[in-house]
Image (spheres, rainbow, N blue to C red):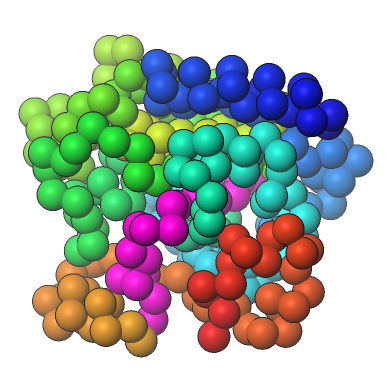
Amino acid sequence: MADGKAAAAVESACLHLQINGWCVVEDVIPKDRVELIRRSVERTVEAYGTYTGVEGVGTRKGLLAFNQSFAPYLADKRVLGIAEVIFGPHVRISFTTAHINYPGNIRGPLHADWPFNQHNAGHIPAPYPDAVMHLTTLWMLSPFTPDTGGTLVVPGSHRSSNNPSGDNGVDPLQPYPTEMQATGDAGSVLILDSRTWHATAPNRTDKPRVGIAVRYAPWWLNLDVLMPGSDDRARIVDETGGNENEVVPVSSAIYEGLPAEVKPLYRHWVR
């Protein structure tokens, strides 16, 4: 995409994020590549994955350590451009996680993502400040539709100082009156202010709905609580018995094989 068109797309997406808390960027992964990546991620989850707390949803956290097929697109001018407009330079990737909604999966609870999910050991206590501190991106390797289980989102909920994971009076297991489904073609990317309330939707088709969650963070956001072996993880998670995500480090060999423009996003995870 030409720089002028990319800049216009970034400006429009940032406005949608500011107002609604989410937007969709189309055609990030080329159509002639997305099916190959989807199949590759499915095989990775089959070989190395686990199930989430939502029945019928498979996952592989720390995906980049197991599969690098999607890596060339992580520094897309629009996706990374949005993160840099919001956070400034020196953006980092905090998570790469495969999510597969298998046919018949159940609806998940409404929540906001780390570090706003109040169930996590490493979280910003509610009421948290009205500031963007983390971006969640969901890479659509399958079409996201009402039938396949396009992610449920609550527009404008990013401006709340709490979310349904924090006992804010909203039942996380019940549909919220203003929720809607984010939809898009395979190869598109759903971008959320990580404070935005969202939930896994049921897949009513006979094929898996495959996606990758990639989260972007500013340089100043402490990610050590996610790192196995770090002092912060030992103090905040291990010693308290708390629940927290764990991101698998990448090897030097995997890191050296990443595209040059992606390496700055991931150098902090090299072990």
Q: Where is residue 87 in the image (x, y as percent from the top left)?
A: 45, 43
- In this view, the residue farthest toward the right is 32
Question: What residue do we see at 26% from left, 46% from top?
Answer: 116
Q: In this view, does 95 lie above or below 18?
A: below
Please check the rendered image and state whether residue 33 is part of the magenta-colored stretch, yes or no. no
Q: Where is residue 1 in the image (x, y as percent from the top left)?
A: 83, 31
In this rendered view, identify the residue nearer to me: 6 or 160: 6
Question: What residue do we see at 46% from left, 37% from top?
Answer: 86
Q: Can residue 52 be seen in this view?
A: yes
Q: In this view, does 87 lie above or below 175?
A: below
The quadrant the C terminus occupies is bottom right
Please check the rendered image and state whether residue 204 is part of the magenta-colored stretch, yes or no. yes
Left or right, residue 153 beside residue 15: left
Left or right, residue 188 beside residue 118: right
Question: What residue do we see at 82% from left, 45% from top?
Answer: 35
Magenta region: 201-228
Q: Position of residue 208 (x, y in %)?
A: 64, 44
Left or right, residue 176 beside residue 20: left
- In this view, the residue farthest toward the front is 89
Left or right, residue 160 beside residue 251: left
